[in-house]
Amino acid sequence: MLRTRIAPTPSGYLHIGNALSFAITWLLARQNNGFIYLRIDDIDTARYRPEYVDDIFDSLAWLGLNWEGGPKTRAEFESGFSQKLRHSEYESALIELQDKGLVYGCTCSREDVRSNALELGKSPHLYAGTCRYLKLPPYRMGGEALTQVPAYRYRLVEGQNISWINHLGELIHSDPSQEMGDFVIWTKLNTPAYQLVSVVDDLREQINYWVRGADLLASTAAQLALAQCLAPDSFGALKVLHHGLIEVGDQKLSKSKGSTSLKSLRERGVSSAEIWRYIGRQLGLQTNFGEFVQGPQDLLGEFNLNALPIRSLNWEKDTL
């Protein structure tokens, strides 16, 4: 069975780009009699706000999207599904990777990462391996070493060939050591980082199909490198769909209170049917987008993975 997830982050109000990704996920799952899990990625406690969680449930209800696994309300989420409740599970994964010699401490700040990369003629976002061989204190259960070591990175194998099957059945290859460099899996706040959390959660939930934006290609390779060490056989049949992003000008959307947030669209009187007609056009569907399209079910008949745009899409609010 196809098992996928909708995984919003409560760090801001959801925007039209999130709606597009959720729509693709829902249409894919429903066409294949699949299972959808709602996972709210709240591990970033600094940006978490209860109103953002409420917005997730409000937006999904407004769009008419349903799911089989995960919480149905904020109260249910906070009491039983929050990632903060699974700190020890992520910590155990970190220790397992460390025991295999794949984790090291790092004292580099973001500015250090940028300046070191530029000095070596690399992308400013590519970690240069500055702390790889310093033998800083290892992580200990309970985080005792964090007073000396701000973060812990995953040690990638240089030249490693990470591959996966995309939504068209094509084999995609990537070398995360060249796309991202050694990446943080445990932060200076003594919390697990996104890459580790996402893999551990997908393993637990038996997810076998990822739907994500084209900006997460490097992240896909990084997470699969982690998965190969934590559970080598678990993602053998994984498929990954990277879709085009909706942009304003030449910038991708970010969570905001601005005109692209679903909350602001609802408040100004935009109907969910108008959103679905917009999504249908962005997906290149040929349906008559008159009153016929009222919700996601009206796009099921024409949704076609082979014709799915992977280019960047422009946000034109006046077309709603």
Image (tube, rainbow, N blue to C red):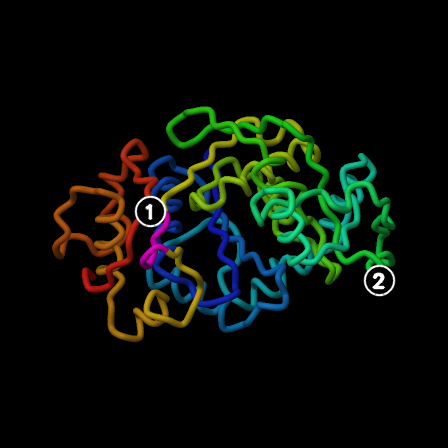
Which callout, 1 or 2, points at the residue further toward the start of the chain? Answer: 2
Using the image, tell me which numbered label, if any, was put on residue 312.
Answer: 1
User: Which residue appears at 34% of the width and 65% of the height?
Assistant: 260
- Tag 2 residue: 147
User: Which residue appears at 24% of the width and 45% of the height?
Assistant: 299
Point out residue 208 in the picture as x, y percentages from the top left corner. 52, 35
Q: How many angstroms separate mark 1 from mark 2 (CA)? A: 43 Å
Point out residue 217 in the picture as x, y percentages from the top left corner. 49, 40
Secondary structure at badge 1 equals: loop
> Which residues fall within the magenta stretch?
245-250
Question: Does 128 sit left or right of 49 as displayed?
Answer: right
Question: Does 223 sit left or right of 299 as displayed?
Answer: right
Q: Quadrant of residue 227?
A: top right
Amino acid type, mark 2: Thr
**Which corner quadrant holds the C terminus?**
bottom left
Q: Is residue 289 above or below residue 274?
A: above
Amino acid type, mark 1: Ser
